[in-house]
Image (spheres, rainbow, N blue to C red):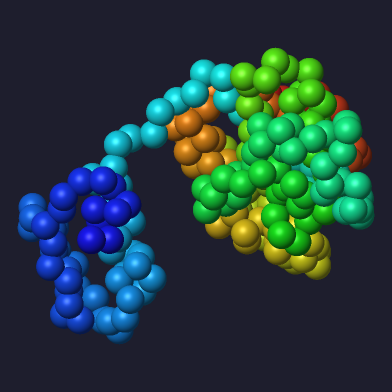
Amino acid sequence: EYFKTMTGKDVAYVASSEGCSDEDGYSFKATGYNKLSRNYSSIMVPLLERFMDPPVVDPNFFVFLGIGQSNMQGKAPIEAKDLESNSNFTDDDWARYFKMNVVHERATAKPPIVRPDTELGVTDYFGRYLVKGLDPQYKVGVVVLAVDGCSVRAFSKDESVCSAYLKEAKNAGATYVTNAAAQYGNYPYGKLVEMAKKAQQTGVIKGIIYHQGETDAAQDGDLWLSRVYEL
């Protein structure tokens, strides 16, 4: 009944404290039997994905990737006016503006956008102004990954370069860098690509917002720029 409710399709399955299998023989071993809809979520999700229709890409859903350090992460205090609906940004406007977190959950893009431990950042009002400037049929989404106080090397495609930088940051006592990077599996670029691909299942990536450089201000500008281009 749970599968039928979620998918609208008849699914034959057997479930018990010993395990669960579907009609195709896709079997699982499980322990700690309780309510199927809760404690068997690790079983339900892959099964549901097999029977549910694939997501549809909405060409009117514009997605923007955000990458950066402290200001992208969000440093300004979140005030009541940043969360409320008003004549400048109505309930209908909020309904067209979305964020995605690191576990691919989509929600209304109210701050904090980047992570629960962050504040008001670059993408907050970027997205709002874009929503207001587009016709009502368009929606806007932001997928943001940011590491406080980091070098561009934190976002390197080369995981060994990223790892070497994070080791340097740890040795220097820059816990604000290592703590943030840890929330992206210590490989921010890989997590960003993963999040971007998930966003492409329902929307179209239209641009990238990059806001980083203060930490690298003392290095050669051409070297920094080459690393940005590589990213």
- x, y percent for residue 16: 17, 77
Task: Give the position of the C terminus as an image quadrant.
Answer: top right
Q: Nearer the viewer, residue 128 or 119?
A: 128
Q: Nearer the viewer, residue 135 or 194?
A: 135
Report whether residue 140 is seen. yes
- x, y percent for residue 230: 63, 27
- x, y percent for residue 12: 11, 57
Which residue sits at x=70%, y=15%? 135
Task: Tell whether 55 sits left or right of 78.
Answer: left
- x, y percent for residue 228: 71, 29
The extreme top residue here reads 135
Task: Tell whether 65 sits left or right of 93.
Answer: left
Q: Is residue 219 above or below residue 39?
A: above
Q: Is residue 50 above or below residue 183?
A: above
Q: Quadrant of residue 117?
A: bottom right
Q: Is residue 50 above or below residue 181?
A: above
Task: Tell whether 1 sits left or right of 149.
Answer: left
Task: Tell whether 120 sits left or right of 178.
Answer: right
Which residue sits at x=61%, y=46%? 107
Q: Quadrant of residue 156?
A: top right
Report whether residue 152 is seen. no
Which residue sits at x=91%, y=47%? 81
Which residue sits at x=33%, y=35%? 54
